[in-house]
Amino acid sequence: QSALTQPRSVSGSPGQSVTFSCTGTSSDVGGYNYVSWYQQHPGKAPKLIIYDVNKRPSGVPDRFSGSKSGNTASLTISGLQAADEADYYCSSFAGFYILVLFGGGTKLTVL
Amino acid sequence: QVQLQESGPGLVKPSETLSLTCTVSGGSISSYYWSWIRQPPGKGLEWIGYVSYSGTTNYNPSLKSRVTISLDTSRDQFSLKLSSVTAADTAVYYCARGDFWNDYYRWFDPWGLGTLVTVSS
């Protein structure tokens, strides 16, 4: 099965907004509202920041928001901070045979 | 709060079986779904499979023939066995709690810190 498609890198300056894309198919991202996003700092475990496309777990700042249009999901970080520099992975339910797909990850650089 | 910790050998020989254990603390293992996820060096994440609170399992089709995940509720632990390993199985292995409501995958949270397993003779 193919991983979800994410750009290799994005960058932004402090205070700006950045948006990450995650493209799948109608069998995964487009077919269900079960897209999640994870933040991973170097050498650390991934941390859940968005689930069910646009829900935030307790403790995640509202600077992080998620959305979906067709087969593409998006994560937006507003008011960019240096501490946001990390890798970001999307993930989606992919049907009852494959179940779970991850994207290849996007590296965020805060300029 | 729930915390997870992986343990097991950091080096496994080719063709042998990789065995890891995840210990759950701060919460009950008798609910939710308990997964293994791996990340080869410099690469993305790959879901390996889960064991549910009731002991049912589900695996990534690409690994299914080599994977066994089991649950030990008496010890609040769950385990991964991956047989016939090759260098391609070298990765950081994470354990994580997951929500698979009615088998719909929704999220993984929290994750363990991860453990690097190298396959080499």
Image: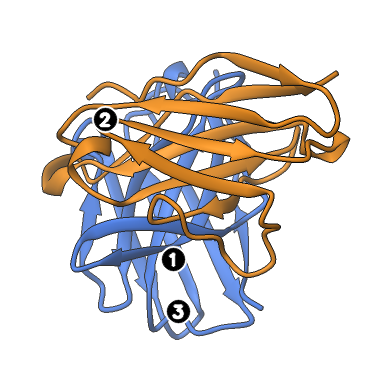
Chain colours: A orange, B blue
- Residue B51 in picture, x, y percent from top left: 31, 63
- Which residue position holds label 3? B29
Kindly state the secondary structure of the residue where label 2 is placed.
loop
Q: Nearer the viewer, residue B5 or A55?
A: A55
Mark 3 surroundings within 10 Å by alpha-carbon count, few (fewer than 14), some (14 through 19), many (20 or more): many
- Which residue position holds label 2? A71
Q: CA distance from mark 1 to mark 2?
A: 35 Å
Q: Nearer the viewer, residue B9 or B3?
A: B3
In this view, B16 is above or below A8:
below
**Closer to the observer: label 3 or label 2?**
2
Give the label on residue A29, or none.
none
Give the label on residue B78, or none.
1
Which quadrant of the figure has residue B92?
top right
Q: Say yes or no: labels 1 and 3 on the same chain.
A: yes
Can residue B18 be seen in this snapshot?
no
Chain on which label 2 sits? A
Which quadrant of the figure has residue A44?
top right
Chain on which label 3 sits? B
- Residue B54 in picture, x, y percent from top left: 26, 78
Chain on which label 1 sits? B
- Residue B79 in picture, x, y percent from top left: 43, 59
**In contact (CB < 8 Å): disc 3 and disc 2:** no
**Closer to the observer: label 1 or label 2?**
2
**Number of dots carrying numbers:** 3
Kindly state the secondary structure of the residue where label 3 is placed.
loop
Circle 2: residue type: Asn
Q: Residue at x 44, y 66 (%)?
A: B78
Q: Quadrant of the N terminus of chain B?
A: bottom right
